[in-house]
Amino acid sequence: MAGNTLLYKSNYAVSSKIEPFYKGGKVQISRDEQYLLCTCGSKVNILQIDTGKIIHSIEQDDQEDITSFSLSPDDEILVTASRALLLKQWDWKQEKCTRSWRAIHNVPVASMTFDCTTTLLATGGCDGTIKLWDVVKQYCTHNLKGSSGVVHLVEFHPDISRLQLFSSSVDCGIRIWDLRTSKCVCVLQSHYSAVTSLAFSPDGQTLVSSGRDKICSVWDLKEKAVKRTVPVYEAVEGVVLLPGTSDYSQMGVKSDGLHFVTAGSKGVLRVWDSSSAHCVFTQTLPDAPALSTEEADLNPRSLMHLLPMPQSNRLATVTAEHNILIYQMPSLAIQQQFVGYNDDILDVKFLGKDDTHIVVATNSSQLKVFELATNSCQILYGHTDTILSIDVFCKGSMFASCAKDKSLRLWKMDPTSGLVHCVARGSGHSNAVGSIACSRLKKVFLVSGSQDCTIKVWEVPEPPPALGCEPGLMTARITEKAHDKDVNSLTISPNDKLLASGSQDRTAKLWSLADMSLLGVFRGHSRGIWCIQFSPVDQILATASADGSIKIWGLQDFSCLKTFEGHDASVLKIIFVSRGTQLVSGGSDGLLKLWTIKTNECVKTFDAHQDKVWALHGSSKDDLMVTGSADSTITLWKDVTEVELAEEQAKQEDQVLKQQELSNLIHEKKYLKALGIAISLDQPHTALRVIREIRQQEHGLQELENTLLKLRQDQKESVLRYCVVWNTNSRSCLDAQAVLQVLLTHLSPEEMLQYQGARTHLEGLIPYTERHMQRIGRLLQASMFLDYMWQKMRITGGKESVNLDDDEMDTSPQSIFIIDKQPKEMTNTQASQQQQEDEEEDLEESENRVERTDEDESVSTSKSAHMNGKKHNGVNRVADKGHVSSEESENEDEVMEISTKSLPTKSTGSALCETATIR
């Protein structure tokens, strides 16, 4: 393909997806700290921590939600509990269920855990009972009753020799069960709210419990009494003891006493000294606004789980927005971030010089920047309400965002580290800012559109503040009342001179950016406009509306040039591709459509989302696009047009080579290989050609049988499918029937029915086969009638009388000819005598018959005599509707007289009949 030739895109393929893998519930890290397990509906997803990829997904067959799970300490056994009241044991590395049994609980299992030997499994049910299972011998060992309400927490004492189980339920107490006697030996009472976590000291003598009553309790297990109550002033969801073997001075640890880390509703990690009950360290989060105590309970950054990773000296936290963060101790630097659930994807844009990242706005106040190669994520904080729109500057490393908090922010990515920081912010709108547009050339400025119906042009500080500095302030240079309703979309022309806006008031407007003067209004949509885009090369504008249509407008006269209709619902997003000659649109029907502007044709429809496609963006090289939907899925698409063309060309070249090889094989009479190639090409006509070549051989039927029986089963299935096609044509039905005869003779009905689509193929053969049989039956009847007439005719004459040379034949019209059945060896004297005796009688009889015979009937008789009588040794037998000009006689010497007026001749030179009188 020439470099200057424009190639229309014809297809995109899904390159990768970022899907939800955690929607709340239990999270567990394997003992080797390589995998993270979490629940997502009816699945348990296994995430490889190093790569951020989901490598296994354990799913319930009954599609029931998983209520709890537990991975054994040796990382070999995974047990899940579902709402169907079943426990299932899995070989999770093979994604295979090895055993399932009824949980005996009357209601779903709320919690479960293994002991350190992977022998006992404890399950706590919503019915207030706890059951212990011997996983090795596969039976229930204990049924512990006494808890009130849901048992949401069960833990074995780390010293297995004690055989103790700790549990907690809605009564806020911590029960200690002696497994030797199956009795509750003690109830630890200190909390006034649900106990969320338990942590044991290395020696097993101290227990730290946390609760949502904003306290942590330190227990002496020997005395079974509380040693210290630590007020933490937040609802605590997780507690982890710091090991005393490492240096944690960076985390405020100055003494050798027991220290523990808490995670709770404030969204920060804090270190506490158990002896003094003081907080010695509080984590600080970048770009995080300070929250008061009252606001902390509503903080979306609240931590729901805290998990230790002792081998690598790390901590893992899970936020209320299902983000998983891994911190390296003692610095508590964020090492990895995973987004478990994105909620609705409202906007997405490519980011970076080579489109290596994407920035995503979800139904939250956080921005998420994903690295496409590893799916690792950076979470950006700054906005205080849902972010609605994003746009990227032409340089690729800067972008802007706007939100419902009436503000907009400017962000910049460090090209070396890939870290993103806020460098400027601005506010001034009186309502939510729903759209934003960035300049396309070197000069940096922003345009924002709000639900207050105004458009603002913002000056950006030059140069933008450096990374790590306090964000600068942006000021609005121009404010214009633009529309009567919400401004849904903004776009800036490639030369930075024009601005177009689309509104919920069903109009689009064109503005001059120099002074925000109105240049024109585009009217024609019957509902609000969701998206507006300038063409990158032409002076046209595209709009997408809630009326389900896309319109192309001319910038000269503001008229509608083209309208594209195909979506069943609102069109939410559009982009230009292929140098402005094609469009890609996304709608609330979950579909993407590729359009060619010149032909008004929808080239392709892509169905990869289950909900509204809010986000759509193309890469700078025009070879990728990314989409985001309300189904929480981000999909990366790759243009495969050139790949498909190359594959098609290679396929055609391969077919040409195979066709040549096929011809050579037929010539060499290697029919088996030739038929195999024809089947691999999926060409029924070529296969028919091979079948006919086989049947034309000397022992064709035997050769055909040998060839067909050597085919593989899938090849026989293809031949059977071809027979259905061949059997529909009378020219090829005999070949189809010959193949069917071989298959039906050597294959049992059971074997035939195992072929793919065999029943359908056989049903398709029946009606045409019946039609062929009826046609053959009619032909057989006609041939029997002809044979009957043949046998009834009496023809006299010798061989020489009908085997005259063409040159000697008299083809001139004659009125009477008489053929004598007497042998040709008759002498001339005998013939003369016979002629003298019968001449008068014969002539008189012939004349009388000529007078009685109608002229038309005579001509018909003569033609029939040629067509039906020129058989066997040249003897003519003539019959026409029972009118025969000879009289039957038992005497073989009797003469037959056939009268006619004229006899036509054939172009080949052979006469229809011979005019002769033999006496």
Image: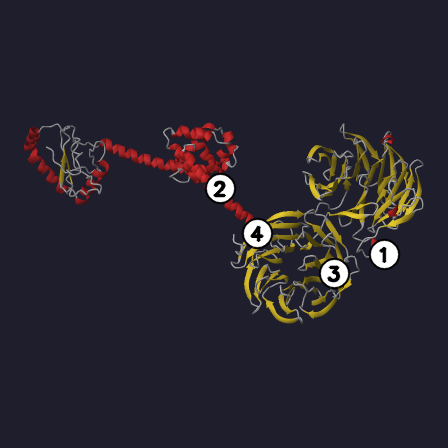
Distance between mark 1 and mark 2 Cα atoms: 72 Å
Write down the quadrant of residue 501 in the picture. Answer: bottom right
Identify the residue position indicated by label 3 in the image: 409
Residue 702 visible in this rendered orientation of the protein: yes
Residue drawn at x 73%, y 64% is: 462
Instruction: Return the residue nearer the eye: 901 or 323.
Output: 323
Distance between mark 3 and mark 4 Cα atoms: 36 Å
Distance between mark 2 and mark 4 Cα atoms: 30 Å
Identify the residue position indicated by label 2 in the image: 654
Write down the quadrant of residue 99 in the picture. Answer: top right
Crowdedness of circle 4 by 10 Å Cα count: few (<14), some, many (20+)?
Answer: some
How many tags in the picture? 4
Check disc 1 and give the amino acid type: Ser
Check disc 4 and give the amino acid type: Thr
Mark nearest the camera among 1 and 2 is 2
Q: Which mark is residue 605?
A: 4
Check disc 2 and give the amino acid type: Asp
Counting residues from the start of the chain, the first of labels 2 and 3 encountered is 3
Q: Which mark is residue 372?
A: none
Instruction: Establish if 551 lies above or below 233.
Output: below
The answer to whether 60 appears left or right of 647 in the picture is right
Instruction: Establish if 483 lies above or below 354.
Output: below
Q: Which mark is residue 292?
A: 1
**Looking at the picture, how far across and down is residue 384, in whole percent?**
77, 58
Q: Secondary structure at mark 4?
A: strand
